[in-house]
Amino acid sequence: MKKPWMLFLLVTLTIIAPSLVRAEDPKPQDIRIEATDFQFKTSKTSLEAMRPTTLTFVNTGKYRHELESDLFHGVESKIEVDGVMIIGDEIQELILDPGKTLKLTFVPRTKGVFEFSCNAEDPENHLKKGMKGSIKVE
């Protein structure tokens, strides 16, 4: 006589086992945005949605620059700069002094085209000088 508990165990494992095996996280994607006086240079113009992303923001200009965008707003993000880490989900703007670099890690969740700009005013309006760009999330 076969034991009913073995049949129960086999059926249970068949149903539950696939949910216990987790797929590996996808390889993170990297993007570099460099701020110069008065333009942005990007290493790529599109990102994959739902894939971990490291955005490196570098200021090679003479002035303080901003990176303002809805790309990472409302998404849990981690900022690392000079040994300091900040985590939050309401980040809309990054401000960086000349010669500095920061890394922002996040997962873009919403597909679409996200514009970014520098709205700094020193010595004049950077946005009016053309300091803007966009990133497509697919």
Image (spheres, grey):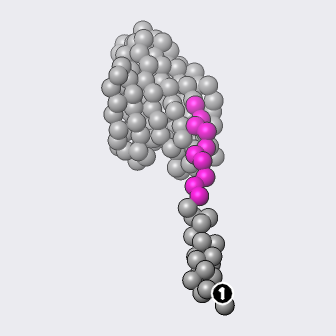
Mark 1 burial class by Cα count in 10 Å: few <14, some 14-19, many 20+:
few
Residue 12 can be seen in this image: yes
**Does 53 appear above or below 65?**
below
- Residue 43 locus on image (x, y percent): 61, 25
Instruction: Using the rendered view, name the quadrant where residue 79 is placed.
Output: top left
- Residue 99 locus on image (x, y percent): 42, 11
Q: Could you say whether the residue bearing mark 1 is in a helix, strand or loop?
A: loop
**Does 91 appear above or below 102?**
below
Instruction: Using the rendered view, name the quadrant where residue 67 is placed.
Output: top left
Tell which residue pokes out farthest to the top in this image: 62
- Residue 91 locus on image (x, y percent): 37, 39
Task: Give the residue displayed 45% in from the left and 16% down from the top.
Answer: 59
Task: Reply yes or no: does residue 22 show up in magenta.
Answer: yes
Residue numbers of the magenta segment: 21-30
Q: Amino acid at mark 1?
A: Lys
Secondary structure mostly taken by the magenta-highlighted segment of the chain = loop
Q: Using residue 113 as the reference point, say whether residue 78 is left or right of it.
A: left
Residue 128 can be seen in this image: no
Q: Which residue is mark 1?
A: 2
- Residue 24 locus on image (x, y percent): 60, 47
**Looking at this view, is 73 or 84 the one in front?**
84
Task: Give the residue displayed 57% in from the left and 70% down from the top.
Answer: 16
Task: Indicate the quadrant containing the N terminus: top left, top right, bottom left or bottom right.
Answer: bottom right
Task: Give the residue displayed 61% in from the left and 64% down from the top.
Answer: 18
Q: Using residue 50 as the reference point, say whether residue 68 is left or right of it.
A: left
Task: Reply yes or no: does residue 46 show up in magenta.
Answer: no
**Does 73 appear above or below 120?**
below
**Does 109 appear above or below 69?**
below
Q: Using residue 32 as the reference point, say whether residue 122 is left or right of it.
A: left
Instruction: Using the rendered view, name the quadrant where residue 51 is placed.
Output: top right
**Looking at this view, is 46 or 53 the one in front?**
53
**Looking at this view, is 114 or 13 the one in front?**
13
